[in-house]
């Protein structure tokens, strides 16, 4: 009470609230009145921040924490009353007609989408000290994840815009439906039509959720690289705040061990993204601009955008309010399982069940073997890769009710079986994929399963695209890097603008092309066409957008080899060490076309 004069009237209310909520221990070690006044003020600044950044404020945080800690102590099953079953969703087969149609529908919708990257986590599990979005998405070109994501969004923006433009052109031309079906091919194969396009593309907004751990480094990465070609105004950074730690089952807030005037804090989880999008006003802005979809994705999934067009097409066609991307999952694999949960009272929802909870849940509900593979060799529960597509209208409506609060959980590490004290402080956490938990039964919640190699293999290149698009790609060889046996395929990389969808890629590969296992190919240009190319070595092509380059014939050189590096060798940069190999550039054919025109490269 003797310190109240230091505080604003709102902070006085917060002080009262803390006392009422059993938090008087926070002031026990405070110095006498008149001493450490600045620190005391700073304490209340921190309390005010913790209060305003949590939906419902600190009081609500403490109340929820008490309930969840009591449930945890009592060993209450979070799925009490629910029976799991395998849900039905859309299972896509890469490159078939259905897939191609969904891709077309997805590209069309992309101009109505906004993308959200959750990038507040640090690479602790990975053993990497930098921000994960700065890591190379692949080693051949060293393009980092953030650059790859931005270029994919820009490529999608352009494809979507061109498709819309073609639809408009088609109306004034002959036959709209026929024209539109072949539009992507015609546009990409004929410079004439491509060059006719002069419209202004609608910008696809891109939001990145950061945290204190990642914010400034993400900002620096963007600024020092001119936002990788995106307009700075197109990118919005939203920083998530940490939440207060808890010392015991009464949810007494934990003091920072190094400062008696601070509360200890820890990350609250990626579920914060919903509250941040709502409270920042971004969702409203997007809604008012007529956007229809919000796509969420994680920091290190370099293949994701190959799966985005088709899965957005599924959302649009099936009118899913929520669409989760999934891959086939081996039983007990450390990926959550997408599950239908049906309650005894009739409620039902399709939701991710984390891998450590799925097995016990199955065993407790009449599946004595728990989480096991079925005849396909995979678990019948698809693996959640945490990429969500939400329809913006229903999402906004829901968030108006909840403020973006997501069902939380607590995971205290108890000292002993009495469960009365913790080994170290804990905190509430939440996950973005738990968003559907509060939705009404009428909500359309679905999922889309893709091949793992297409949608979810963070640093694996994708030669099968090329194989199916008409090129003969050699089988991989087995090699060992960092003590792990891996399949080494030829390294084929291209800029997203060269081709994001199966149709776009297929249209740029013709005749009989082949690529040997030791080969590397880097396509930096937009209008590069591979025609009867036989590659055994390294080939690097760069070209301006208005240059059409036809590449064929036999390319033979020593190429680029992979050389193992010791992950303990600190003379090697960290991002290479954790990968376990570096690239030796022995010999390559490298060509750059900086002027518009038609060119042929046939060695
Ligand atoms: N992240 C934040 O932005 N803020 C945070 O506070 C925490 C994380 P992890 P996780 O794909 O295999 C998820 O740590 O949460 C970002 C699913 O829950 O990489 O253990 C962080 O930067 C799980 O079901 O993953 O597991 C990163 O971009 C499974 O599908 C993202 O959130 C698993 O992903 C994910 O954080 C998976």
Image (cartoon, grey):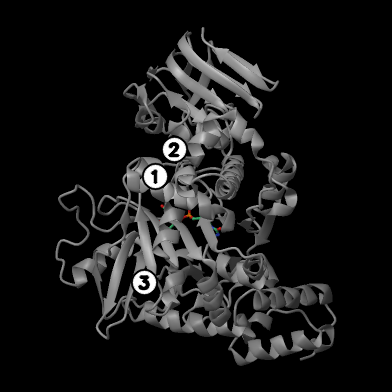
Image quadrant in which you'd find residue 314: bottom left
Q: Which residue is mark 2?
A: 503
Q: Which residue is mark 1?
A: 100
Q: Which residue is mark 3?
A: 416
Query: Which image quarter is the N terminus in?
Result: bottom right
Horizontal arrangement in the rendering, residue 601 relative to residue 385 (left or right): right
The x, y position of residue 573, in whole percent, is 59, 31
Spatial distance from mark 2 to mark 1, Cα to Cα?
7 Å
Mark 1 crowd level (few <14, some 14–19, many ≥20, 10 Å Cα) = many
Image quadrant in which you'd find residue 224: top right
Image quadrant in which you'd find residue 55: bottom right
- Of residues 487 and 364, the one drawn nearer to the viewer in this rendering: 487
Spatial distance from mark 3 to mark 2, Cα to Cα?
59 Å
Which of the two discs, 2 and 1, labels the residue nearer the N terminus?
1
- Of residues 599 and 343, the one drawn nearer to the viewer in this rendering: 599
Horizontal arrangement in the rendering, residue 110 relative to residue 513 (left or right): right
Above or below, 515 relative to 163 = above
Q: Which residue is found at the position 80% from the left and 90% from the top?
A: 2
The answer to whether mark 3 and mark 2 are in CB contact below 8 A is no
């Amino acid at each position: 009470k003797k310190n109240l004069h230091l505080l604003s009237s709102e902070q006085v209310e917060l002080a009262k609230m803390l006392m009422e909520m059993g938090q008087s221990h926070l002031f026990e070690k405070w110095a006498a009145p008149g001493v450490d006044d600045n620190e005391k003020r700073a304490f209340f600044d921190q309390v005010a921040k913790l209060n305003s950044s949590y939906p419902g404020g600190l009081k609500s945080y403490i109340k929820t924490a008490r309930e969840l800690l009591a449930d945890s102590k009592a060993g209450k099953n979070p799925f009490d009353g629910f029976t799991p079953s395998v849900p039905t969703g859309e299972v896509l087969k890469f490159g078939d007609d259905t897939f191609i149609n969904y891709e077309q529908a997805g590209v069309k919708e992309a101009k109505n989408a906004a993308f959200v990257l959750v990038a507040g986590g640090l690479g602790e599990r990975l053993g990497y000290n930098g921000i994960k979005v700065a890591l190379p998405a692949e080693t051949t070109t060293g393009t980092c994840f953030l650059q790859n994501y931005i270029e994919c969004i820009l490529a999608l923006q352009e494809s979507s815009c061109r498709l819309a433009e073609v639809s408009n052109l088609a109306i004034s031309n002959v036959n709209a439906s026929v024209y539109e079906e072949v539009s992507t091919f015609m546009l990409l194969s004929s410079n004439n039509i491509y060059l006719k396009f002069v419209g202004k593309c609608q910008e696809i907004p891109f939001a990145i959720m950061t945290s204190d751990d990642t914010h400034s480094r993400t900002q620096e990465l963007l600024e020092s690289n001119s936002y990788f070609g995106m307009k700075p105004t197109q990118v919005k950074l939203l920083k998530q705040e940490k939440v207060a730690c808890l010392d015991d089952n009464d949810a007494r807030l934990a003091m920072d061990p190094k400062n008696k005037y601070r509360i200890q804090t820890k990350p609250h989880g990626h579920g914060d993204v919903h509250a941040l999008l709502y409270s920042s006003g971004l969702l409203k802005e997007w809604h008012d601009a007529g956007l229809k979809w919000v796509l969420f994705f994680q920091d290190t999934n370099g293949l994701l955008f190959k799966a985005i067009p088709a899965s957005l097409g599924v959302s649009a066609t099936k009118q899913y309010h929520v669409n989760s991307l999934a891959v086939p999952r081996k039983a007990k694999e450390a990926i959550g399982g997408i599950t239908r949960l049906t309650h005894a009272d009739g409620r039902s929802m399709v939701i991710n069940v984390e891998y450590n909870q799925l097995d016990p849940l199955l065993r407790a509900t009449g599946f004595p073997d728990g989480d096991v593979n079925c005849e396909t060799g995979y678990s019948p529960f698809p693996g959640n890769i945490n990429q969500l597509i939400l329809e913006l209208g229903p999402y906004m409506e829901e968030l108006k009710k909840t403020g973006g609060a997501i069902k939380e959980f607590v995971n205290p590490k108890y000292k002993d079986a009495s469960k009365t004290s913790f080994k170290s402080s804990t905190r509430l956490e939440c996950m973005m994929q738990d968003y559907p938990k509060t939705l009404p039964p009428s909500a359309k919640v679905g999922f889309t399963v893709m091949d793992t190699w297409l949608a979810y293999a963070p640093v694996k290149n994708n030669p099968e695209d090329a194989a199916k698009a008409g090129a003969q790609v050699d089988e991989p060889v087995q090699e060992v890097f960092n003590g792990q046996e891996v399949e080494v395929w030829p390294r084929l990389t291209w800029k997203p603008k060269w081709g994001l969808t199966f149709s776009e890629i297929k249209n740029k590969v013709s005749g009989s092309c082949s690529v040997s296992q030791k080969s590397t190919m880097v396509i930096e240009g937009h209008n590069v066409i591979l025609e009867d190319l036989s590659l055994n070595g390294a080939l690097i092509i760069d070209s301006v957008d208005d240059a059409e380059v036809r590449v064929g014939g036999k390319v033979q050189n020593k190429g680029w080899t992979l050389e193992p590096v010791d992950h303990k060798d600190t003379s090697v940069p960290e991002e290479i060490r954790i990968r376990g190999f570096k690239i030796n550039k022995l010999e390559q054919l490298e060509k750059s076309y900086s002027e518009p025109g038609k060119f042929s490269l046939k060695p």
